[in-house]
Image: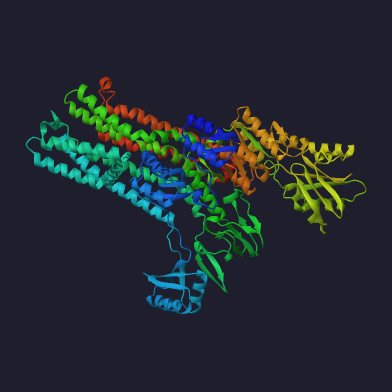
Amino acid sequence: MSCSACVANVEKAIRAVAGVTDAAVNLVNKEVLVQGGDPQAVVAAIRERGYEASLPAGEESPEDGYEILVDDMSCSACVANVEKAALSVRGVRSVVVNLIDKRARVIGGDPQAVVQAITKKGYAARLPKRFISDVFFLRPVTDAQQTLVRAQEFLAGNMDDVLVEKAGSRLRVQTSSHPAAVARQLAEHGLNFFVEEQLEDPAAGKEKTTLLEIRRSWQRAILAATVGFGVMAGQMSGLFPPVAGHRGFWLSTALVCLATMYLSGRQYYVNAWKQARHGASNMDTLVALGTAAAWISSLLVILQPDFIPGGSNHLYLDASVMILAFLQFGHALETRAKRTTSEAISSLIGLRPTSARVLSGEIEVEIPVSLLRLGDILRVRPGERIPIDGVITSGHSSVDESMLTGEPLPVKKSSGDPVIGGTMNRSGTFTLQVTSLGEETTLAHIISMVKKAQLSKPPIGRLADRIAGVFVPTVIVISILTFIVWMFVGPQPQAAFALTAAIAVLVIACPCALGLATPIAVMVGTSRAAQLNVLIKNSDGLQTASTLSHLVVDKTGTLTKGAPTVTEIMPLADQKQARVLQLAAALEGGSEHPLGEAVLEAWKKRGGDLPQVENFVAVAGRGVQGEIEGRTYLLGNHLFLDERGISLPGDLMEKAETEAYSGATPIWLADSRNPLGLLLLRDPVRVDSAAAVKTLQQSGVTLVMCTGDSRATAMAVARELGIDQVHSEVLPEEKLAVIQELQARGYKVGMVGDGVNDAPALARADTGFAIGSGADVAIDNADITLAGDSLAHVAVAIEISRATIRNIKQNLFGAFIYNIIGIPLAAGAFYPFTGWLLQPMFASAAMALSSVTVVSNANRLRFFQPESSADRRRVA
């Protein structure tokens, strides 16, 4: 599907299937939500209309997606070619190509078949290498060959399931035994080794490759510039003889230029040939055609000076290499700028420790984190980063989790508490048991989410994708038409002017800037957001967050601290305070609501046992009930009791309303017939909520409070924070109705949620914000995940989304304007009025600088700071 007409066709086909009652087509996500009918019949109907359709595959299949590394991509045309090749493979449902990282994320199809399809298009494609966990290396502490020999003999003679072989100055070991156990056994026999992983750090390898690419680009640029300026200076100064009568000299010069073209621009010609063989084209095609035309036309003039009347004064040998000099110079600057765009994600990766101390027997063995196994016991000392996710088994400490939550204060940890890999151990030594490995750790999930967001494309960038598919062929046609027009209407020598203009058109056109405009901004923006504790799941969420007009927020845990306390207990019917609190705590024992936790915490401070609760039932938005010692008890708000016909005393109701007006939350306890007591809880407003609300309102976002709390309590918090729109005493499903009502009035609505009950509303909202400490289903249904509980993170998310989309628009505007002005200028459209005719070498300089400009503009997002002064202090 590509347009609104496709949507109409698909909907019409679906509705024609028997049993279908409704159908909603999502053009952006290429998905259809169908109610009723036979799924297979619906798929068949869509296919009959000419659209490829399939049912989503199960979670156990490769339909979850995989990545393919694609080399040799240089511009937006390459992106279009790779996407087209991958989509041609049977079963492939989605392809997103990242030009900066030179990788594609594919959903569906056979990975090997996709690799082959991309390779057939002329691009070097491959699947990422997989780490073999049972293979590692042993490097002797003291570099002695005798140590290697003794260790090899010991392992071969004392371990049954081991394969050992020398690999230079190391031993390559393959075994099912734990690497730490192997190193310990060797150490017990006086053989000390370092344990090393099989593969080198991919980030370090990428950095090395990038630096090499920059250095080679500079070398190629200097070579081409030296030859080009030499030829130009010789011609302009008169040091070089005329073409007539000095053919040998100029043929030698042409060969020198040809050798320079090979050494400085070989990749352009090789890639262009690969594309041509498969009926495709890209930026390399334009460069190869432009420089080849310049050199070949010069060679013809040298061999036959009358080929172009007066052509001896219009040689393009200098242009044929100067074009490459400017392009390589631009490529070096562009690659250097791209390198900085990855600093943010590299900083996240840098948080992952590379080694850990494993307790093996009575000794500690330091091994790479990648070789750890579930259940390993690790020791962590003060000042060290926690190597991996786990649970503390002994000891206690305080841990700095600011990289995840943004909260600067360390969190106390003791035995039984979970800890997260990458966080900093501030004080105390402890041991932990490994609970997650590799890509299952919290930090790995964060990095994966950021990378997936960088691979996605916002709707605003898809116009550029459509243009990129036809850009290069269109430029070639314009170049040919330019040559023809100049041959007929240009001044003498017509052929010389026609060649100049046609070559300039080829080399000034820049699909590279067009292809970089969107992904480079998304890459920098999402990485910077991650540094600010905002995890953007996809680019659709990035764009919709920038357009929000309304934000629906819960009160507890978002506007307030989410840590309420019991401030007063008022018993009724001859009940004692302790008995009221005991019954309330027993009922809340099965609840995870912050109010329930507050009641339990109050009982823990008093001490004592809680009675057993049977037939426990939780009623969302109302309260809980259960049987204790054969009697039914209720605990919840006044509506919960009203709905069950339990009348409340007027004096206590008045007291509850008065306290609620000042911000307290009243909770009533009753048996099946009579009220037994009233508990008052207070949840203080977060210190940064007022500033966050003000920031959001100043940015044009209207806040809507949606809470299950009483009207009086909700209004008290709303008055304190300056929120005008309040929906109180709402059930979870009523939050969805609030969002739908706002959307029906034409507003763009965001939703902040943290629980299972918030999942439908998060999915329905234009942009869903999930609290990072919330339920997994809430996070799964959200577009943006906030690492902390503060509303300030939402303000930051909206700010950076707007900054990123603004940057994309700037890049697209620059890329479009550059080509709209540059191509007519190179074609000589302004020559009749101004006498301007752009020389090919200057056209290539403009082309190179256009890409550098786009990348440099996107890199400004690396220095983005949120408007909130509190956030600015934290980030600085």
Whether residue 755 can be seen here: no
Query: Where is 404 relative to 845, above or below?
Result: below
Please identify the quarter of the rendering in which residue 229 is found. Answer: top left
In the image, 617 versus 802, the foreground residue is 617
Query: Where is 479 relative to 172, above or below?
Result: above
Residue 867, image x, y percentages: 57, 37
What residue occupies the far right of the structure in this picture? 574
Residue 167, image x, y percentages: 38, 69
Query: Where is 487 relative to 341, above or below?
Result: above
In the image, 705 versus 374, the foreground residue is 374
What residue occupies the far top of the structure in this picture? 833
Q: 497 left or right of 477?
A: left
Query: Where is 371 relative to 470, above or below?
Result: below
Residue 709, image x, y percentages: 75, 39
Please identify the quarter of the rendering in which residue 238 is found. Answer: top left
Q: How is the image coloured?
A: rainbow
Whether residue 324 can be seen here: yes
Residue 580, image x, y percentages: 86, 50
In the image, 198 versus 383, the foreground residue is 198
What residue occupies the far left of the structure in this picture? 245
Give me the residue at 24% from left, 43% from top: 224
Please identify the quarter of the rendering in which residue 656 is found. Answer: top right
